[in-house]
Image (tube, rainbow, N blue to C red):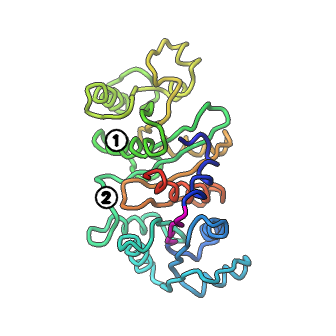
Amino acid sequence: MLTNISDLQKIVEQDPTKKRLVLCAAADEHSLYAVYRAYKAGYIEPILVGDEQKIRKLAEEKWYDLTGVQIIHETDPKKMVQRSVSLIREGNGEILMKGHISTAQILSGVLNKEWGLRDKKTISHFALFEIPAYHKLLALTDVAMNIAPDLSTKIDILNNAVSFMHKIGVEEPNVAVLAAVEMVNEKMPATTDAALLSIMQRRGQIKNCKIDGPLAFDNAISLESKSHKGITGDVAGNADLLLCPDIEAGNVLYKAFVFFAHAKVASIILGAKAPIVLTSRSDSEETKLNSILLSAASYSFQK
């Protein structure tokens, strides 16, 4: 079971098989640096897809030694995506990572019905945080993929996240379904969805986790707040996973954890045939490296 983000490095180092990472549109300073670090540390085998001249020029400027690294030359963004996704689909790579290309472009390839990677009905973003002020690792979903999920989509997002938490050793994660308040209010759809998810779990419609909601953020993570407001149950004050009401709330909370709470984070896209690293430019190099490690380690979790 993971207890901190640095455990990912140990897990990957213990796996004798290096995972092949396909970096789509690889002529990107920030992504290439993270991939190069992971490569030089022996964590992955990179496959770089993109304009070879630009990739090599960037590598020379940064003193990266790409000797022996496979580079697939492609200048057209759509063909970069198709080539990268197809490598994964055909079994010639285990991890897909976004480089200097838009999220919409790479996801169009991932979701392509003919040669894409969609494995489940819904793909979703999962972030795992090590927060100094919290007593254990805390996961957050979905902050990057599903804009305004309805109840059915929230169930899919939840199932993706819970399944992954089982892989990292959390056998029955405590899921806090977030809203602005802890009381059901019919004028606030996030609260009614949260209540329904909680009831569905208690009736066995959602399995292998404990769900409580609606819970305001303070109720979800603070035992003091839980006690002050008279909330009972195992989830409040001890959440393993926070399910966000929408992408705005999730994105703000993600960045607040990183920039205000100085959290370490690793994130991954779930629901595809392979893990996808889809970090943003505002993510630090450490976050990008941690996300590569989480993707690589996800194969070890399955053993």
**In the rendered image, which quarter is residue 28 located in?**
bottom right
Who is closer to the viewer here, 274 or 228?
274
Of marks 2 and 1, which one's residue comes earlier in the chain?
A: 2
Read off the residue under disc 2: 119
Residue visible at 66% across and 65% down in the picture: 41
Q: Quadrant of residue 83?
A: bottom left
On screen, 243 above or below 217? below
Q: Is residue 259 above or below residue 106?
A: above
Q: In the rendered structure, which segment of residues is drawn in magenta? A: 16-23
Amino acid residing under circle 2: Asp
209 magenta-colored: no
The answer to whether 197 is drawn above or below residue 83 in the figure is above
Q: Position of residue 171 (x, y in %)?
A: 43, 36
Question: In the rendered view, would you say 42 is above or below 217?
Answer: below
The residue type indicated by label 1 comes to: Lys
Chief SS of the magenta region: strand
**Residue 226: which disc?**
none
Q: Residue at x 71, y 82 (%)?
A: 60
Q: CA distance from mark 2 to mark 1?
A: 17 Å
Residue matched to label 1: 154
Taking the spot 32% from the left edge, 52% from the top edge, the residue there is 122
Tell me residue 16's x, y (percent).
55, 63
